[in-house]
Every structure is written in structure tokens, then in C-alpha cells.
Image (cartoon, coloured by chain):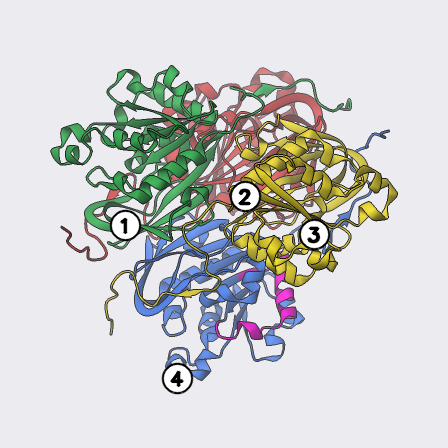
Chain colours: A yellow, B blue, C red, D green
Amino acid sequence: MSEKIRVTVWNEYRHEKAEEKIGKIYPEGIHKVLADYFDGDDKYEVKTATLDEPQHGLTDEVLNNTDVLFWWGHMAHDEVDDQIVEKVQSRVLNGMGLIVLHSGHHSKIFRKLMGTSCNLKWRVADEKERLWVVEPGHPITEGIGEYIELPKEEMYGEQFEIPSPDELVFISWFEGGEVCRSGCVFNRGRGKIFYFRPGHEEYPTFYNEDIKKVLINAANYVAPVKRGDSRPEYAVNVSEPLEKIKEKE
Amino acid sequence: MSEKIRVTVWNEYRHEKAEEKIGKIYPEGIHKVLADYFDGDDKYEVKTATLDEPQHGLTDEVLNNTDVLFWWGHMAHDEVDDQIVEKVQSRVLNGMGLIVLHSGHHSKIFRKLMGTSCNLKWRVADEKERLWVVEPGHPITEGIGEYIELPKEEMYGEQFEIPSPDELVFISWFEGGEVCRSGCVFNRGRGKIFYFRPGHEEYPTFYNEDIKKVLINAANYVAPVKRGDSRPEYAVNVSEPLEKIKEKE
Amino acid sequence: MSEKIRVTVWNEYRHEKAEEKIGKIYPEGIHKVLADYFDGDDKYEVKTATLDEPQHGLTDEVLNNTDVLFWWGHMAHDEVDDQIVEKVQSRVLNGMGLIVLHSGHHSKIFRKLMGTSCNLKWRVADEKERLWVVEPGHPITEGIGEYIELPKEEMYGEQFEIPSPDELVFISWFEGGEVCRSGCVFNRGRGKIFYFRPGHEEYPTFYNEDIKKVLINAANYVAPVKRGDSRPEYAVNVSEPLEKIKEKE
Amino acid sequence: MSEKIRVTVWNEYRHEKAEEKIGKIYPEGIHKVLADYFDGDDKYEVKTATLDEPQHGLTDEVLNNTDVLFWWGHMAHDEVDDQIVEKVQSRVLNGMGLIVLHSGHHSKIFRKLMGTSCNLKWRVADEKERLWVVEPGHPITEGIGEYIELPKEEMYGEQFEIPSPDELVFISWFEGGEVCRSGCVFNRGRGKIFYFRPGHEEYPTFYNEDIKKVLINAANYVAPVKRGDSRPEYAVNVSEPLEKIKEKE
């Protein structure tokens, strides 16, 4: 890890170009709004990457110099190259933080890291979402009150087929009657993954000040720590035992 | 789920045929010894399946009629067909219990369900293993004392790259100086997975009475419960909300 | 553990006698309705105990012959004798299952076992509660659909100050805008504790068929398993090591 | 939280004065050695407190200005005043970090926060302990290799009756044949608790450079984050719902 936290914001960047309504909300793409959270703060270095760049903008050079990767995708999950997905997984297991946003629940990388379908219920109906803090001491909730209220969001509801999160930070209430585990930390290998539910492309969710706070907190939280040893890529044969083993018949 | 627990024991079944020493310990294969745990007890129906059978013995017919699947593999993980692996994963998410034994830690199915490398340290040196019970109230430990001692086993040591188990039941002490989380329950979808560390092919571990008790307990524990609804295969659009959603500007 | 599951239903039994409205809903007390779940099924032996009996009905004889204890209390938590609370705790750590209902969240025994305040938000306003199943493979949800709906309940809302549950089974949605972790399993010592949120004394919640199913499932789930050894009451000095320790300078 | 992390090291401070052998190892007390970890680093403010001071040195003034409290006790757990214990618990639930060392496993404060007996096996036999890192990405392990080796320590062995830790960071191997969950994080209320096993008074464990690193890392890790709201001391009646509740018959 460098002194600075090196953030890379990955965005599918299709909806914004294909649909006028969405393009008006995020004229330079969702990634630009997220990158702006960090831009200008010298605690961070930030760059962006999108699906239609060569290698989706996620070259080895980029991935190896990323401490925290944001991931927003939706309509083109299948177009993400399996080899890139494997590289991202490997980087996470080696300590890179990963923040998966909203419809990224169905991305290849999230499903691969979870081992489950990540299926859930959904509905787009301009409905109110209220994200309740269930772990008020958690660093990701710093500066947030008892809940975050979003006037209009897509609904995602239980049962959300994920492994039980290592830390459940937010639970959402929806106007239409559902609930969702909407802020979840998963530890995988040396890396931390934060799944955060809100962020439908038709709403200006990423401009909300509380959402911004949560995502900056999350970047700080999932950023890797330095380690005194290196991680083995394979199972390791340690033929020399640390202690003497008695010979047996 | 039928009235009986339908157990299928899957075994790679290569070592036993290829190496005389191993063939002497398990003349009809490891699967036969495991199947014999259940055979003759009318609480169970048991069958076996092996790598070199068509579809590895895991046809849809077999998988759809299995409540608990045992998995022992080692030298030929790569020969397991990806489509079969996906079917097994789907069955687990739908509620089938899965018991992964020893070197199965590196099987495709276990890695796929865990999302991590499942790497660990290892050494074959005829060394003593002592499995300590850390959750003495857990059903898998019924009838077991404070620990299980195996005079000779292969060593598997930390760091074992798995997600933090939902239930950590056993921790192993090894003569050569290592430790291992050696009895781990993972909940994935509607299914339960039990990873149990011992069972190297060169040792008669599966004849040990305590090991047998643990594996019978485990089969009972991971067997699915009946559910009042069926599991959706995809994300579900619930366009009709349960509660009225206010129209917004 | 005997062959049968020995259930004891403990109830404060004050509201029902003090308030006519409540007495009409539960004329023989909440405990009677709960005991009736098990009465007549020869898988169970059931008895009841109430606050105003000598030793609150929880003599050593009763406690030592209880596999699963239900606990409903509210207005008189402070009148429960500390010594009885300690005995119940000891029994739980020794394997007795404990099912804490609704306002029992603030009982001495639950707070003692949790180590936290167990504070939460609350409101009595005849509001709808919908309990969503978040672990559909969990034995406690057997026979339950995607959710349980209660037309009128008291609201309990987050942040509910409990340790992160070992298993989170239900999350509630409330009409008034809150959510609550409403079905939680905690493992403590050899015992299992199930906290279940609904059950306000002014509503006929315990007559609801789904609530009944959940509580019968829960009794089966938290009932203890047989162990091959006995639990030590104190720290144990094992001056004789299992392995030879080298003499050091 | 002030800008600096305010550390208070609490020590029973009896063994060091009563036994010459121990006094030679820790002439100014264990607390002095621990305080020296932080002294001179302007990231921290450090003070000490001991059992025989008035209020055990833990006045409201001290507790209210402590971000991280270390706790070492052994022979006089019972002499710690219950009111002080309650104040410490309250501070932890409000966000103060607590680091419980070695024989502190049986302290009133640890047992109160855990809700279990915290019993374990023990033996003093100059035996080797090797603490294996099981979560190599965890901030508490920063700068530590695969394990820490201590040439002589007291043995603590499983079954260690604690709730399943929220994060299991270290597992110990002992020369005499036992294992122990020896580095455990528990979240309680807004506070983090780190239990760290080594530190028997007859050995110079706290001078070990790796142990020092772990404890400095742990202080950083359990230090509270700032919160935007204050924690309620009681259950809170929110009679005004956030959403309109329909009137019912």
C-alpha cells in the first residue's frame, strides 16, 4: 500500500449514454460522481475505468495499483471478461478492498466471491427507502445519524441470497413493505468487501450527502493494511516441521 | 425431502486403485467405508458415485434425490466437469447438505461455494492430530469427548484461506507445530456445508469410531428441512407492492 | 436429555390479571397458550411456571428437568430473583435451550446472557408487522412462507443493542417506518438462545398459526444434544500435559 | 474522541509486589511496560490505574476520558468493585475500546460482557506457545508474520467458554497438546473488545516485540470512531411514527 489510498472507480457506463433521462442525472457517468468524492483530497489518488475501455480499463497495471475498487454494473454483467474477473478476485484475496454498489449484486465478481446466486426481489416504483444503522459503532457509519432516508429508490428485498455477512451494518425499510440487508461487510482472503444497496441509475442517489459519507468511510475501511509476509498463491508444502515428529510404527 | 435421509457418497476413487498401499486400507474405496456408516440403518438410504462413472455418477436423477452429499477428491479435481459442479452448487443453494472431506478443500465445488482459494499448508509425516471440540453444544459433536485423537494424519495448517465459518466446531493441534480450523459449518443459500479436515488416503482415518460418529452427526445436521415455499432461480420482480406507495413528483 | 423434550413455559403473568382487556385475550395467561402448543403431543412434556409462585416456579427440580425454557416478562423484570437468574444462566450454559419472547428482551436473564443493554425503540400503535425470512433453510422457518404478517403489533425498532446474533433468521418491517432483527439465535456455552420479537400482551399474536409453527420449530431447534463428557463448572488445571514438554533453562 | 487516542492501562498490580521472581520481571508493574508502548508517541496519551488506588484508579473523570482501556488482573478479580465494573461496561457499550489480557478472561468485566463463564483449561509448565494468524488481512496482525512464537508461556486450552468471537484473529498451539482461540474481537454496543491470551506474570511476554506490535495495533483497532448521534441509555418510546399508520378496527 502506498501512503495514499489508491481508489479506482469502475462503472459499466452504458445506461448513462443510452438513456437520456439517466444521462441527465449522471452526465459524465456514475463513476465521475463517485470519483469526485475523493478528487482533491490528498489522502487519496483516484482514477476511473469503464466496461468499454480495453480490458475494461482494468489492466494489471491498474489493478496492481488499486487499494480500493468500486464496482457499479447492471445491464452488461455478462460482457465482463472472465479473466478480468479472476484477476479482481485474486487482488481481493490479496488484500484489495472492493465496494460493490447496488445492481453489482449480480455482477460476476460479486457472485464469484460470495459463492451464492445473490438473487433478491426488486421493484422500481419511486419508493422511499430508509437505511437503518444496526451497528452504530462501525467505522462505516461515522457521521451518520440513526438512519439515511432516500425519497425515491429501487426496492431490493429479502430473501437476498448471500452468505451471512461478517458485519451487517445497515438494514433497509421500503415503503412498499420489504426489508433488505443493505450494508454488508464480507472478509474474503486478506480483502474486505462492502456491499451497499442503494444507487439505482434513475435516481440521484450518489449526490446524497449521507451516501457520500458512507462511501468515503467504506473506502477507508476496506483499504488494506500492510502485512509482514506475502500471501502464497498455492497450497504450501512445509515438509520441515516446526516441532520434532516422533517416528511411528 | 423424503422421510429417509438420502445420502450419496462421492469419491474420486483413483488412489485406491493406483497405489497398493492405499488399496489395502480401502480395498473397495473410501466411499464404501463411508457408505457403510449408513447402510443397514433404515433412517437412511445410501448410494455411492465415483469420478469415472458417466457424469461422475452424479446424474440429475441422483442429485435431485440426494439430501446429503459427501465429497472426497484429491488428485483429479480438474477432471470434474464444470457443469456437474454447477449442478451440485445449485442443489446446495436449494438445500442439499454437502460434506467436504479432507483434500476436498481444493475441489472445484468447495472453492466455488467459498469464493476463496482454500489454500493451506500441508505435510505428510505420520504425525499426530488432536481435534479439539470448541463448540461442545453443537449437534455434530454429540457423543464426542473433549477431543478426537488420530495417531497418524496428514497435516493441514493455517492460514487456511476460507471465509470465516458460520460455525467453528473443531480446531486441530498437530504434532509438528501447526493448528487448523478443522470442522467448519458454512451456510450457503438454503444448504449447509460441513468441511471436515481428516481423511488422508494413506491412513485408516475413516475406520475411527469418533470420526464415524462425527460424520453421521454431520449428515443429520446438514440434511435439509422442508420449506413452505420454493426457491426462485432468478431475481424476482415484485411489481405489485405489499403496501401502497405514495405517488411522488 | 430424556427421550421427550421437556418444555417449561415461564410467564410473568401480571398483565393478564391486572388489565381486563388483556385478560380477555389470554384468560389463563400467555403461558397457557404457549403450553397448549406442546400439550397432547407425546414428543414433549410441558409444564408452566410464573413469577408469583415460590421461587417463581423455577425450583432446582424444575430447572434441572427442563430442556427448553420459554420466557415472557415485561412489567416486573426487577422482581425476578437474582439467584434464580443465575441458575437459569448456568442451565443455559450447560445446554438448556432458552426462548426469550418480546418484552423479555429487557429481562435480567437475557441481558445477563447478552452482556449488552438490549435497548431498542418501541411504540404501541396498532401497526402492521411483517417478519421476513432471511435464512429460508433454517430449521426454525420450516413450514413458513416468505414472511409472516401480523395485522397489529407493538413496534420494536433498531438500533437494538444486542451482540451480532450467531444466526439472524427474521427481520421485521413495521408500518410506521422501522425495522428490527426479530428472530435471532445466540449460542452461549452449550446452550442455544432464540430471541423472538412478536408477542405484545394486548394482541392475540400467540394464537397466530405461523407464530405457533415458529415457536414449535424453535423448541426443537434449541433443545440440547447429548454430550460424551460433562461440562466443568470452573477453569480446569490440567497439570499433566498430553504431550511431553521439553525442560527449558 | 479527542484527536489523540487516550489509552488507560489498568493492572491489578499485586503479583509484582508480592512475589520477588515476578517483581524482577516487571519491577514497576505490568502496566508500566504496557504504558511504555505508547509513551512518547504523540499519537497517544497514556495513563495507568491499579486496583489499590481509590476507585481502582478508574474515576468517572478517568473513564470518561479513556478511548482504550487495557485490563490485566488475576488473583483479585473479586476485589474489583461491582459499580466500577458497571461503569466500565457502560463505557464499552458507549464506544470505549477494551483490551483484556490473559488471566483477565476471568475478570468481572469480561464475564459480564460475554455472558458466559469464560472457563478454560490451564497449566503452568514453561511450555512453548505458537500463535497462528488466521486472519492475515486483519489490522491487528499488521507487521506480524505467519505466527508469533513464545518460548515459555502458561497454557490456556479449549474448550474456552466464550461466545463465538466476531473476529477470530489468532489460534494458539501449545507444546503440551492443546489449542486455544487466543486473539478474539467481540463487538458489544458501540465498543470493540479484544481478548489476547498471552501474558502470564512469570514470563517476560510483554517485552516481546511481536506482542508489543499486536497490542499497539489492537489499541488503534478498538479505539472508537466519532458518531453523529448520542447513544440512548434506555429503551426509547418513539410515539410519533415516521410513516402514517392506518387506523384499524
Give the spatial CA distance, label 3 vs label 1. 45 Å
Residue C148: where, in percent of width, then height? 68, 39
Magenta-tinted stretch: B74-98
Give the spatial CA distance, label 2 vs label 1. 31 Å
The residue that disc 2 covers is A223
Residue B181: where, in percent of width, then height? 41, 55
Q: Is residue B219 visible?
A: yes
Q: Chain of mark 2?
A: A
The residue that disc 1 covers is D129
Circle nearer the viewer, 4 or 3: 3
Q: Bin the neighbour count of mark 3 within 10 Å (Cα to Cα): few under 14, some 14-19, many 20 and up.
A: many
Three-letter code for the amino acid on which mark 4 is drawn:
Glu
Q: Nearer the viewer, residue D236 or A125?
A: A125
Q: Is residue B229 visible?
A: no
Query: Is B214 rendered above or below residue D71?
Result: below
Quadrant in the picture for residue D209:
top left
Three-letter code for the amino acid on which mark 3 is drawn:
His
Is label 4 in contact with label 3 (beta carbons under 8 Å)?
Answer: no
Determine whether, in the image, residue D178 is placed left or right of residue B232: left
Circle nearer the viewer, 2 or 4: 2
Q: Is residue B237 magenta?
A: no
Residue C119: where, in percent of width, then height? 53, 25
Q: Chain of mark 3?
A: A
Q: Secondary structure at mark 2?
A: loop
The residue that disc 3 covers is A106
Q: Residue at x 14, y 29 (%)?
A: D18
Q: Secondary structure at mark 3?
A: helix
Q: Are marks 2 and 3 on the same chain?
A: yes
Is label 2 in contact with label 3 (beta carbons under 8 Å)?
Answer: no
Determine whether, in the image, residue B15 is placed left or right of residue C22: left
Is label 2 in contact with label 4 (beta carbons under 8 Å)?
Answer: no
Determine whether, in the image, residue B210 is placed left or right of residue C48: left
